[in-house]
Image: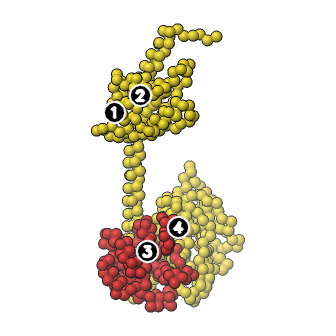
Amino acid sequence: MAILPRDDDEDVALSLTMAVIAASPTPLLLLDGEFRLVVASTSFCQSFGIDPGTATGCEVFMLGAGEWNVGSLRKLLVGIASGVAQIEPCEMDLKRSGKETRRLIVQVSQLVYEDLDHPRLLMAVADVTDARSGVRAKDEAIAHIGVLLQEVRHRVANSLQIVSAVLLQTARRTNSVETREQLKDAHNRVMSVAALERQLSASPYGDEIVELRTYFTTLCDNIAASLIDDSQCITLSVTGSGLVTPRVSVSLGLIVTELIINAVKHAFPHGRSGRIEIGYAANGSHWTLSVSDDGIGPPIDAGLDNTKLGTSIVRALAKQLDANVEVTLGNPGTIVRIECAKVALGGENDGFMPTAPSQEDGQRKQGDHVLERSNTNGHAARR
Amino acid sequence: MDMPHVDSACKTLMIVEDEVLVAMTLRDELEEAGYDVLDLTERPEEAIAFALESAPDLALVNIQLNGRNDGIALAEQLKALNIPVLFISGQVSRAKTAQTVAIGSMPKPYSPTDMVLAVTWLLASLKGDESRFRPAGLEVFPTNTDEIASAQ
């Protein structure tokens, strides 16, 4: 059996309710069924310049100079009072003469209590003006950084183009065939980095990841266009794929460039036709990059010239990647493998994003004869 | 790679580029491939004068010319003279926003041999032949308004 409260208990309860609302740090209003103000929190009155003495009993829309008479607020209050379920909070602009417009989020709920004849609505107001302007400032800063990044990219592209042009102009004007070849090789190295820059500019992955198959295919196209005569039929193909960071991809791209240049120059003498295949396979931190050709193979004495620039570039870059360089006899031709089998520590993968190895890639053919294996002293590529 | 001389016979090109070494390298490569290349210029007014006098088959235009983005306005004027434009700029996004005034973009950094292939492809495609080798860096812009709107 319910115990009915005494009148003085009701007075105490009502007084406590009013005090709780008045002391709320969040701007709060208690309204009656006609949207008249029963009590406002001190925080509401201070935030929005309302005099609690004159406001009590006023319809909420008449507060201040009528700035609360806003369509979205009226619609929200009417909806809640009529019992329409799940009305979302409304956003409104509070416009006051001589003051900055404030962006408010207003939430209203109908209080459920025993006196059905006197409905009460609790209205909470959050001023999100400053938070929104913070978000806007952040968005503007991000957009500004994007513009700066584009400008840097543009300058890098321009600079690479100029460097490339200087090398080609010098190559054109030199009488020495050897020097001309070396300058063209240098041009190809610059274009290897340039291809990466261009891929990053248009990458759907952003600036953080390079898709190697696309990158190696572009390198093959560039090198084929610059080194292979129409009279010679040398096919370049790429198998496998992987995702790596730009830092790692620069090294891999330069290695591939050197090995292709080497194969084109030495594996197919006298207009011989053939095929060069670039493969990449990765499994966790273990990865293999291979460049194989079906050309004439290395000379019998395997007298690889350690002083050649291409060789030293491949060796140095492989060392930087903690990888071994291994040159083996193909059947026919030559296979150069750059292989890294180090154990990853604590999730550290040094810029390599694991991808499943392709079935056809990265597998040692039975019977391959290892000519050389080294990551410090070996001759990687030159025949 | 030997360039296709047959395709380039009697075709005249104009290069508008403010980096003189880049322009020279491009000119040398295109001439070696058999194209006639007008005197190099970096000034839009001069480019218009050359265009009126020689009516080149294609204009290769850098967007930024001497620190100003005059290349887009120049492309607009050349389009009005029925001279197709290929943007040769590292400003990839700016080129994209100006695709109504050009037929394509070959962004820096490009290799000059790729640029020859791009020019050859574009000139052939203007005659309806798209069977030539198209270098990976060449972006071809849509030609009708609907396609341009959806691309943007």
* Figure chain in yellow: A
What amino acid is labelled 4 in the image?
Leu
**Badges 2 and 1, same chain:** yes
Using the rendered image of the protein, determine whether residue A313 is visible from the camera's viewpoint.
Answer: no
> In percent of the image, x 39 and y 34: which residue is there?
A68
Image quarter (top left, top right, bottom left or bottom right) of the C terminus of chain A: bottom right
| Mark toward the start of the polypeptide (2 vs 4) | 2
Mark 3 vs mark 4, CA separation in Å: 35 Å
Res B102 label: 3
Query: In what element is the residue under mark 4?
Result: helix
Q: What is the secondary structure assignment of the residue under circle 2? A: loop
**Of the two numbered discs 2 and 4 in the rendering, the one whose residue sits closer to the viewer:** 2
Mark sitting on residue A59? 2
Q: Tell which residue pokes out farthest to the left in this image.
A: A98
The answer to whether residue B81 is seen in the rendering is yes
The Cα atoms of the two marked residues, 2 and 1, are separated by 12 Å
Question: In the rendered image, which residue does mark 1 sit on?
Answer: A65
Residue B122: x percent and y percent? 49, 80
Q: Are marks 2 and 4 in contact (CB under 8 Å)?
A: no
* Mark 1 → mark 4, Cα distance in angstroms: 70 Å
x, y percent for residue B45: 30, 78
Residue type, mark 1 in image: Ala
